[in-house]
């Protein structure tokens, strides 16, 4: 499976971590970030979240995030998977897995990737709430 | 021909997901013509690359995207 993917279907954290680990036995630290759907946001219940992407540009932007992270940080490999579909509370949305010889750059790279993904990757989420649908505008 | 794509809240506001525009317009003119000038903030991409220069003149075959700020993750 590709190291950077946007897909409708769910993913397995274990499978992604294992695939990353297979790339080298010199990896001493693996950091994961798993983003999940919440049932509450902005003071109201959230029934579900619908995702939309600018296909092509979104995948390319995620791919360059990975390339950039591999250049900036002292890390060995990165995997990024983002779902674009309708998700419900507790469902998995995004996974970032970073492997490095040591933990510190792995933590730093993982945080940088999720922060930068929110700014650069053309994906949008719309929350379905009891008050109607609302596009999420901020990225806290 | 120039293809214009709308996403997220921009698509909802306009009630459509795409439109055609004339070749030779600046991005600022194109945005005004499509009644998107009052949408702020508005992110713009040409051929899947974000662009800041609103004086850019759209060319035949360009794909322009008008997008709200991203909210993935």
Image: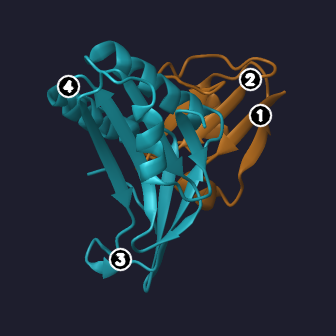
Chain colours: A cyan, B orange
Q: Position of residue A56 (x, y in %)?
A: 65, 34
Q: Which residue is mark 3?
A: A39
SS at circle 4: helix
Q: Which residue is mark 2?
A: B62
Same chain for the residues at labels 1 and 4, yes or no? no
Q: Position of residue B68 (x, y in %)?
A: 48, 46
Q: Which residue is mark 1?
A: B3
Q: Chain of mark 1?
A: B
In the figure, is residue A129 to the left or right of A85?
A: left
Disc 3, disc 1: CB below 8 Å? Answer: no
Disc 3, disc 2: CB below 8 Å? Answer: no
Q: Chain of mark 4?
A: A
In the figure, is residue A63 to the left or right of A44?
A: right
Q: Residue furthest top?
A: A71
User: Is residue A86 visible in the rendered structure shown here?
Assistant: yes
Q: Residue furthest front?
A: A25
SS at circle 3: loop
Between the residue at mark 4 and the residue at mark 2, the CA separation in whole angstroms equals 40 Å
Nearer-N-terminus badge (1/2): 1
Residue depicted at 61% across the width and 58% down the height? A9
- Of badges 3 and 1, nearer the viewer stands 3
């Amino acid at each position: 499976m590709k190291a950077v993917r946007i897909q409708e279907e769910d993913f397995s954290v274990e499978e992604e971590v294992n695939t990353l680990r297979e790339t080298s036995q010199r990896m001493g630290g693996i950091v994961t970030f798993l983003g999940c759907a919440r049932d509450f946001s902005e003071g109201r219940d959230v029934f579900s979240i619908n995702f939309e992407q600018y296909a092509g540009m979104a995948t390319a932007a995620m791919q360059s995030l990975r390339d950039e992270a591999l250049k900036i940080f002292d890390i060995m490999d990165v995997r990024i998977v983002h779902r674009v579909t309708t998700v419900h509370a507790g469902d998995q949305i995004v996974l970032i897995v970073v492997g490095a010889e040591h933990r510190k750059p792995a933590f730093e790279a993982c945080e940088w990737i999720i922060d930068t993904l929110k700014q650069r990757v053309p994906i949008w989420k719309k929350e379905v709430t009891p008050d109607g649908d609302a596009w999420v505008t901020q990225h806290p | 021909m120039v293809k214009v794509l709308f996403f997220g809240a921009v698509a909802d506001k306009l009630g459509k997901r795409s439109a055609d525009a004339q070749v030779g317009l600046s991005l600022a003119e194109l945005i005004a013509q499509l009644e998107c000038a009052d949408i702020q903030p508005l992110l713009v991409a040409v051929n899947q690359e974000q662009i800041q220069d609103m004086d850019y003149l759209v060319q035949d075959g360009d794909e322009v995207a008008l997008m709200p700020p991203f909210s993935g993750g």
